[in-house]
């Protein structure tokens, strides 16, 4: 009997800390050993010329999330996790959203039931708290945190999700007491409403109006407010999807004062700009394909975000995958969306393209190191959200979640080759150097050369018992 189920030989193993030539021995879905030579295995994968990276963890994705009357998200758990697998990911973290007036516990249970049996990669579920009633703060949220839902997101904008300052303080307080991680969507609701109404009155209803209605200062102000509330309550928070220099400066300022403010950014803030929302050719409506919040900014902001990545202001790069079909009355071009930017569903697809875009623009250009790439795409996600020592690195005891990566492979991103449920990609025609050639999840090859080999149900819905670090 061979000692291992699977051995990976000939590759360069990359973790957040090391880059080394080593072999990996895998048994029962876990890594048993990483060594110069490992013993016989039932199957050997030849990784010559390839990097062996920790499987991507995408800790901010939206899947099958309720999105308002008549609007349907383009991915269910099967299609989103299929796309994740093809893109080199082995774990994703979507959100169970509490609709106002509904029970948070019931929302979490129903969402988990949607995921069970459908996933190609492992899933760990965050919550979205939109209605922090006494019952939610006093019973439901503490019980859910104890049951392993150890992270949740709060919103400072959106009609149906926004919390006021007092509510934010109250949920922060529960998180500190119960040991949960809070993610904050930092954009100021009232300022956005004020600007949106002014723009509409002036006749600016095109998708580009979305960018004008949410300038950087709206994000900067909310980031500052969230930081102040976190300091008051003495809570670590994660400010998610930071789009530009101004919000980033607030975060760097707080970090410089010793506050534990964690930050996330996304490939769209490194590669897209507000001008994309003007649309392609003479079709301004096609700008709807790029409408997400916060909106992508400009070249100066892209440069600032790169420098934040280099300096460690940001710990994680997530996709914020939030897919809507473009050419669809249930998506971007819904009847109301055609009348004003205000009704275009916010969000863009990116679960499958996150790793290639960041690798190409980050590692291949020399802006970040391979080790930073591993940290930003896997290790730090696991550490922030209580999955570490099980996921996020390559070493004995970790799940055998690996991505074999060809750093020299050139590819042009095309919608036709992607696996998500959206009908477009914002990165159509984008050329990358570096590509995932094999995804291994808990010791099984789930994707190879763009073909997904797993069945829905192979991925598990994880319980998180570890406190976030
Ligand atoms: O536009 C975006 N990002 N939509 C997704 C929801 C969110 O705020 O992350
Ligand atoms: Zn958000
Ligand atoms: Zn922390
Ligand atoms: Zn999001």
Image (tube, rainbow, N blue to C red):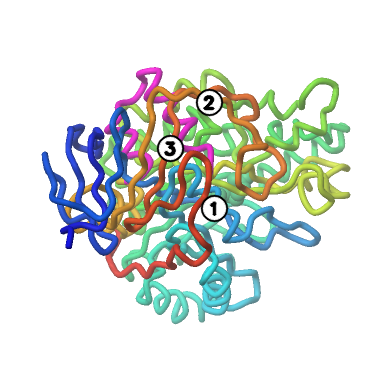
Q: Which of the labelled discs sits on residue 120, or is there none?
A: none
- Local secondary structure at mark 1: helix
Q: Position of residue 119 (x, y in %)?
A: 51, 62
Residue 148 in view of the camera: yes
Q: Compare residues 366 and 214 and report the one nearer the observer.
A: 366
User: Residue beneath label 3, please?
Assistant: 437
405 or 280, which is in the foreground? 405
The percent coordinates of residue 163 (x first, y second) are: 57, 60
Which quadrant would residue 288 be assigned to in this image?
top right
Look at 48% across and 27% down and name the residue there. Answer: 245
| Label 3 SS | strand
Circle 3: is it few (<14), some (14-19), or many (20+) Cα within 10 Å? Answer: many
Residue 293 highlighted magenta (yes or no): no
- Disc 1: CA contacts within 10 A as few (<14), some (14-19) or many (>=20): many
Q: Is residue 212 left or right of residue 205?
A: left
Q: CA distance from mark 1 to mark 2?
A: 20 Å
Query: For the residues carrying marks 3 and 1, which lies nearer the camera in this image?
Result: 3
Residue at 19 percent of width and 35 percent of height: 18
Residue under the image location 35 percent in, 40 percent down = 315
Q: Looking at this view, is 368 or 4 the one in front?
A: 4
Q: Which residue is mark 1?
A: 82
The residue carrying mark 2 is: 411
State which quadrant residue 436 falls in.
top left
* Residues drawn in magenta: 352-378
């Amino acid at each position: 009997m061979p000692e291992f189920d699977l051995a990976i030989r000939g590759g360069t193993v990359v973790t957040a800390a090391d880059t080394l030539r080593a072999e990996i021995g895998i048994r029962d879905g876990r890594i048993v050993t990483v060594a110069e030579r490992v013993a016989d295995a039932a199957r050997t994968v030849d990784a010559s010329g390839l990097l062996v990276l920790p499987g991507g963890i995408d800790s901010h994705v939206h899947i099958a999330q309720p999105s308002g009357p008549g609007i349907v998200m383009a991915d269910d758990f099967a299609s989103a996790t299929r796309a994740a697998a093809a893109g080199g990911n082995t774990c994703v973290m979507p959100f169970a959203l509490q609709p106002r007036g509904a029970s948070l516990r019931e929302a979490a249970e129903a969402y988990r039931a949607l995921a069970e049996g459908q996933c190609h990669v492992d899933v760990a579920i965050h919550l979205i708290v939109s209605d922090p009633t006494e019952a939610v703060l006093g019973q439901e949220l503490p019980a859910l945190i104890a049951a392993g839902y150890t992270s949740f997101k709060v919103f400072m904008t959106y009609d149906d999700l926004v919390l006021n300052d007092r509510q934010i303080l109250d949920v922060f307080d529960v998180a500190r007491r119960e040991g949960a991680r809070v993610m904050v969507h930092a954009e100021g609701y009232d300022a956005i409403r004020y600007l949106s109404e002014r723009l509409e009155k002036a006749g600016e209803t095109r998708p580009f109006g979305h960018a004008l209605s949410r300038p950087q200062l709206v994000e900067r102000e909310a980031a500052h407010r969230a930081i102040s509330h976190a300091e008051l309550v003495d809570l670590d928070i994660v400010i998610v999807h930071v789009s530009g220099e101004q919000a980033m400066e607030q975060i760097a300022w707080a970090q410089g004062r010793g506050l534990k403010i964690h930050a996330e950014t996304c490939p769209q803030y490194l590669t897209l700009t507000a001008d994309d929302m003007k649309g392609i050719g003479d079709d301004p409506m096609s700008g709807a394909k790029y409408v997400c919040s916060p909106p992508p900014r400009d070249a100066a902001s892209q440069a600032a975000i790169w420098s934040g990545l280099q300096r460690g202001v940001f710990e994680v790069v997530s996709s914020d995958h939030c897919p809507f079909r473009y050419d669809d009355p249930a998506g971007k071009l819904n009847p109301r969306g055609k009348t004003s930017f205000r009704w275009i569903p916010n969000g863009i697809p990116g679960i499958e393209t996150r790793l290639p875009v960041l690798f190409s623009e980050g590692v291949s250009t020399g802006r970040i190191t391979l080790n930073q790439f591993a940290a930003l795409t896997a290790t730090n996600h696991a550490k922030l959200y209580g999955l570490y020592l099980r996921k996020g690195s390559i070493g004995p005891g970790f799940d055998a979640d690996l991505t074999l990566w060809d750093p020299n492979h050139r590819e042009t991103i095309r919608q036709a080759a992607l696996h998500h449920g959206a009908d477009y990609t914002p990165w159509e025609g984008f050329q990358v150097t570096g590509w995932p050639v094999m995804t291994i999840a808990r010791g099984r090859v789930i994707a190879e050369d763009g073909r997904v080999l797993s069945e829905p149900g192979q991925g598990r819905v994880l319980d998180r018992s570890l406190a976030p670090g």
